[in-house]
Image: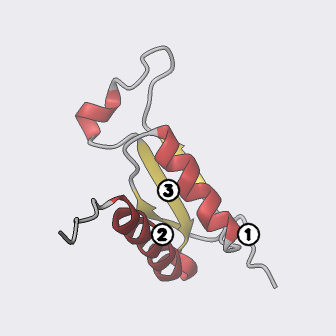
Amino acid sequence: MEPHADSTEEFVVVMEPRDSVAASLAKGILENEGIPVLVESYQIPWYDGIMTPATGAWGRILVPARLASNAKAVLSAYFAEQEDEAAPTTDPE
């Protein structure tokens, strides 16, 4: 059964992505796991990216508090796997 959020449920921050691409990726990963997600942008319309240097992030990813630890584990596992795949390979010779 897929978990659903209700209007009274508390949402907490699990990630502050650096850009909209990372935010969309995180949202998709969490939704694929059945975790409800809210994406909140810090950006100001017509001033693309102006808030990123000021805040250090593009925005934030929020999930229901009861699912926060699971969401963090899912995101950590995904991004750790991506780092491993992006690591340069060493030539055995």
Which element is circle 1 on? Answer: loop
Crowding near pointer 2: few (<14 within 10 Å), some, many (20+)? few
Residue 15, image quadrant: bottom left
The local crowd at label 1, few if under 14, some if 14 to 19, many if 20 or more residues have their Cα within 10 Å, is few
* Distance (Cα) linking label 2 and label 1: 27 Å
In the picture as drawn, the residue positioned furthest to the bottom comes out as 1
**From the viewer's perspective, is residue 81 above or below residue 86?**
below
Residue 65 image point, x, y percent: 52, 76
Which mark is first along the chain, 1 or 3?
1
Where residue 48 sits, quadrant-wise, is top left
User: Which label's residue is closer to the chain start, 3 or 2?
Assistant: 3
- Of badges 3 and 2, nearer the viewer stands 2
- Dot 3, how many residues are within 10 Å of its Cα: few (below 14), some (14-19), or many (20+)? many
Residue that mark 2 sits on:
78
Say which residue label 3 marks: 61
2 or 1: tag closer to the N-terminus: 1
Q: Which residue bears the numbered disc 1?
A: 6
Q: Residue at x 61, y 66 (%)?
A: 30
Look at 71% across and 70% down and name the residue there. 5
Q: Quadrant of residue 2?
A: bottom right
Q: Residue at x 59, y 56 (%)?
A: 27
- Three-letter amino acid code at the position of disc 3: Ile
